[in-house]
Amino acid sequence: MKRLICLSLIVSLSCTVLKAVVYDALVIGGGPAGLVAAMEIARAKYHVAVVAPDSGQLVGSHDVENIPGIPAKPGAEIMDDLQKQVASFGAEFINDRVTAVDFDKAPYRLVTQENGILEAKTIIIATGSSAKKLGIPGEQEFWGRGVSSCAVCDCFLYTNKKVVIIGGGNSAIDEALQLAEYAREVTILVRGNEMRADAWGQDKVREKKNISIRYTIDVLEVLGDEEHGVTAIQIRDTATGLTQKMVIDGVFLAIGHKPNSDLFKKWIATDAQGYIILNGRSQATAVPGVFVAGDVADPVYKKAYIAMGAGGQAGLEAVHYVRFHG
Ligand code: NDP
């Protein structure tokens, strides 16, 4: 039976339909951590749903070669297979975005954009992290018109064009390999003397004739106009002090990520960068029955297989919690 409920804490959603079902567990986030958590909960025969608008960052990875037992393949394929595997155990998928949470008392509540309020005895936070921006002039003005942080989404727009990628990590490698399939010239701009990306990725990039790397480069400004969008960037070589205009068609940012923890800060402690703080080796938080897994709580490793392991651990802890406290 459905009933109407009014929630004073959500100003924009004063009255909504509350679904009668109280899930054993709701997983917020559809990346590797969230899916593996859901898989363990579903395998234990508990009622679990993954609430997420997308499948996380791994779908943007051109090639993932370090998931044990899975030969190198695109992140999108890995996530597709994982979704099917998780669904095969009975986990549900709710394609929606969580806009607020209420962890005051169980059952805990998630406010969603499309599905009203969802309730569960236990929650897994697996919201991952989002791409950072530089904060330089022109970046916001030309966002979506030549500035992007998703090569896999926008690469086809740059067929036979010149693009730069800013950053020296594994994301920069991924973006470069993806864009090199389309663009005429891809230049990776690294602010320091070396890339921090894994050696195998750097080797792959060096094999590509249309990818080059420039070191000690700061990007100062994105330039463009109404008609063409981005047309150039202003850069400075910090080794020589020389400033130069570089004519290009697109700028891809790959300068790291910010944990998506803002929704939970009223209830759950984060560090100075916003990463959720875990209770020792457990995936538990200070709120009983609320667990966390993946990049939102990982300031160090940030690998998909590590997120998967943490997701499995969070899922098992949630199962234990529901069994004995739910
Ligand atoms: P990282 O934090 O690893 O790298 C960020 C890069 O951006 C660094 O080179 C950093 O430079 C540079 N940077 C940061 N701020 C600025 C700035 N203001 N201006 C210019 N450059 C800047 O982030 P990634 O997104 O690359 O990776 C995040 C995590 O995800 C990593 O752990 C990575 O291994 C993982 N990952 C794994 C993949 C895979 O296994 N296939 C694919 C993609 C990501 P500096 O080094 O000087 O600090």
Image: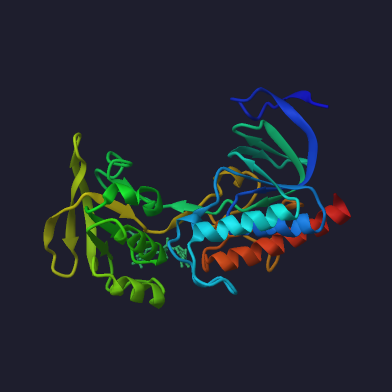
Q: Is residue 285 visible?
A: no
Residue drawn at x 36%, y 65% as measured from the top left: 173
- Among all residues in the image, which is located at the extreme right? 324
Q: Is residue 89 left or right of residue 82?
A: right
Residue drawn at x 32%, y 60% as measured from the top left: 181
In this rendering, the answer to whether 83 lies above or below 98 is below
Q: Is residue 92 left or right of residue 133?
A: right
Q: Is residue 176 left or right of residue 93?
A: left
Q: Quadrant of residue 262?
A: top right
Question: x, y (%) of residue 283?
Answer: 69, 61
Q: Quadrant of residue 100?
A: top right
Residue drawn at x 76%, y 31% as measured from the top left: 19
Question: x, y (%) of residue 242?
Answer: 11, 63
Question: x, y (%) of residue 176?
Answer: 33, 62
Given residues 235 and 27, the one toward you in this image is: 27
**Mark count:** 0
Query: Quarter holding the N terminus?
Result: top right
Residue drawn at x 60%, y 25% as measured from the top left: 11
In this rendering, the answer to whether 130 lies above or below 143 is below
> Which colouring convention does the figure follow?
rainbow
Given residues 279 and 113, the one toward you in this image is: 113
Point out the quarter of the image occupied by ligand 1.
Answer: bottom left
